[in-house]
Every structure is written in structure tokens, then in C-alpha cells.
């Protein structure tokens, strides 16, 4: 089972590219696609979901070009887009039955899958309420359920935890981990903690290009010895942020504790600390001299 992206580009106008020369090979497991808003993640997801075609390059599903044979992938695909919508007058049961019919599931299989998935996404008690009365987080959970209806071999989820509360977010992360054994799961997000908790392989991208693809451990090694903690007066914060890459800050009674990613110590008062994945992500996106690597 392999999904291969070969030199894919997506052009929206003469001077605007959503993707450029993107190459990546995906095998079973959870793949985290991490980048800021506007990095090209959704453009790539729509191409992989066969909703749009690349302007250049190709995507192969088990060796077959999905532009020429989209149904070979569509039959084994589950997709939760970032802008997922529902039919407001249908309830969750009716909506999921409709999606199951569209995906070609027989009635018995559909009912079994729907019952199980409503449990997974914690919507059993609300299954007969019209979707128009659902909160944003509840609609997102319905979206997760519809993406899993056909037990897909390739599952694509684009910003899936938007609108979920912390408990639901943890539930979703655990569900992704449980699903990862025999399928390709692509989790696209700008939330580092979602990737950190779920993905065994992380792909960093920015401005439509691949920055780096590595394990979380390898990414952390990139910033080993480059992360510093520095307590400064609040009055100095603005100036420091102009000259240093600040990954986080915490207010304290004696000033503001800054977490800074830099080759050298920013001050003799700063002390080295262990890096986290967000440090590595910000270091890569900020334009540090990283080679494109696979």
C-alpha cells in the first residue's frame, strides 16, 4: 500500500502557486503534515482526495495515476475537509446513512458502522437531533464519522480538531493512533500538539514547498542546544521579539519568561533548555538553513 506524490505543483494564477515541486511517498501509519496557514496543506489534501488535479507532477496510488484512474483511490478513501458542511435538516443517523449509501455500503454494514462510529465520536445521545442545531465541535465529530464509514485504506483529515474541546481532541488523537496500523492516515494541521501526539512521521511545509520529512525525534535533534529560556522585563519584550525567534512566553512576577530558539545564547542570563517539537517547527518555518530531506 503506497501513495506516492511526485513533483506535484498547483498553480492558481500566472504568479500564484499553492504547491511547487512537492515529492513525498506515504506508506501505512500516521503522517503529520504541519505548516502555517497558507502553507499549501489544503491544496495538497484536495489533490490527494481527487477533488482537483495538479498543474504539474502526478500522484500514484499503488502505482496508478489517480488523475487517470481516480475511482481506484476514491473507493478506499475517507476524507474530512477543512470546510466540512452538513445538511442542517437531517439528523446524524440520517446524514450518515445517506453518506453510506453514496459510498456504496450495504444496509447491514452501514448500520453496524454507524452505530460503532457514533460511539467513537460520542454522539449517541444526539444522533436524532437535526444537524443544524449542532455546535461546531459536534459537526466536526459527524465529519470524522463520515470519513471513517467505509473503513478506508487512506484517511485524509484536514484541520480535524478545529472546534473540538480538549477532551474531544484527546479522544480524536487516540482514535488516529488506533487506526494507524493498516492504513495511511494523513493529518494536516497547524496545531503542533495534534501532530506531536499522533504522528510517527512529520512533514514540515511552508509556502507550498516541502521543508523536511522526519520522525519527531529527528526533528527535535535539529534544535538540540539551540533553545534558551530567558527572563526579561516586560518592557524589553517587543525589542527582543524583533531580533530573536520566540517560541513561547510566560508572565511571571519578576518579568516575562521567554523561550528562544537561536544558535547562540541570546544573553548571559539565558539558560539552555530541552527542545520541544514546536521549537523545531518554528525553527524550520522561520527559514533556518535546513536542507530538504527525506
Image (cartoon, helix red, strand yellow):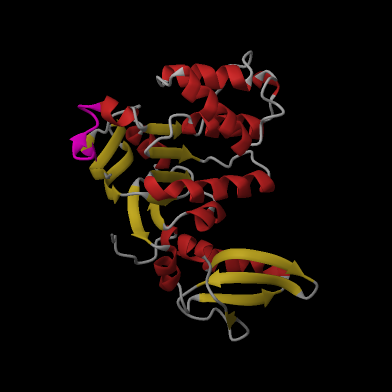
Q: Residue furthest bottom?
A: 268
Q: Is residue 89 positioned above or below 127 on the image?
A: above
Q: Is residue 290 positioned above or below 116 on the image?
A: below
User: In the depicted view, which residue is nearer to us: 239 or 44?
Assistant: 44
Q: Is residue 77 positioned above or below 165 on the image?
A: above
User: In the depicted view, which residue is nearer to us: 139 or 286?
Assistant: 139
Q: Is residue 184 positioned above or below 292 on the image?
A: above
Residue 14 x/y as whole percent? 27, 32
Specify start and end residues of the magenta stretch as a single range: 58-69
Is residue 84 in view from this perspective?
no
Q: Is residue 204 left or right of residue 237?
A: left
Q: Is residue 61 magenta?
A: yes
User: In the depicted view, which residue is nearer to us: 20 or 14?
Assistant: 20
Q: Residue furthest top?
A: 89
Residue 218 x/y as whole percent? 39, 68
Q: Quadrant of the C terminus?
A: bottom left
Q: Quadrant of the N terminus?
A: top left
Amino acid at each position: 500500500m503506497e501513495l506516492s506524490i511526485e513533483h506535484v505543483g498547483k498553480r492558481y494564477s500566472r504568479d500564484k502557486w499553492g504547491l511547487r515541486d512537492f515529492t513525498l511517498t506515504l506508506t501505512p501509519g500516521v503522517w503529520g503534515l504541519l505548516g502555517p496557514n497558507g502553507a499549501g496543506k489544503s491544496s495538497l489534501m484536495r489533490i490527494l482526495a481527487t477533488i482537483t488535479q495538479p498543474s504539474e507532477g502526478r500522484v500514484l496510488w499503488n502505482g496508478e495515476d489517480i488523475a487517470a484512474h481516480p475511482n481506484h483511490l476514491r473507493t478506499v478513501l475517507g476524507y474530512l475537509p477543512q470546510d466540512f458542511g452538513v445538511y442542517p435538516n437531517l439528523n446524524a443517523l440520517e446524514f450518515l446513512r445517506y453518506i453510506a449509501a453514496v459510498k456504496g455500503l450495504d444496509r447491514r454494514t452501514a448500520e453496524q458502522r454507524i452505530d460503532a462510529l457514533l460511539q467513537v465520536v460520542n454522539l449517541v445521545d444526539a444522533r436524532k437531533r437535526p444537524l443544524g442545531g449542532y455546535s461546531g465541535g459536534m459537526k466536526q465529530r459527524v465529519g470524522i464519522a463520515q470519513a471513517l464509514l467505509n473503513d478506508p485504506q487512506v484517511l485524509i483529515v484536514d484541520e480535524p480538531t478545529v472546534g473540538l474541546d480538549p477532551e474531544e481532541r484527546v479522544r480524536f488523537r487516540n482514535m488516529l493512533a488506533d487506526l494507524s496500523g493498516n492504513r495511511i492516515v494523513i493529518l494536516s494541521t497547524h496545531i503542533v500538539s495534534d501532530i506531536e501526539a499522533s504522528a510517527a512521521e512529520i512533514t514540515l511545509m511552508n509556502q507550498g514547498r516541502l521543508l523536511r520529512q522526519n520522525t519527531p525525534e529527528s526533528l527535535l535533534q535539529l534544535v538540540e542546544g539551540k533553545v534558551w529560556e530567558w527572563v526579561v522585563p516586560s518592557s524589553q519584550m517587543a525589542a527582543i521579539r524583533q531580533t530573536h525567534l520566540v517560541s513561547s512566553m510566560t508572565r511571571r512576577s519578576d518579568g516575562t519568561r521567554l523561550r528562544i530558539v537561536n544558535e547562540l545564547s541570546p544573553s548571559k542570563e539565558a539558560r539552555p533548555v530541552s527542545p520541544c517539537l514546536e521549537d523545531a517547527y518554528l525553527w524550520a518555518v522561520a527559514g533556518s538553513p535546513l536542507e530538504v530531506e527525506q
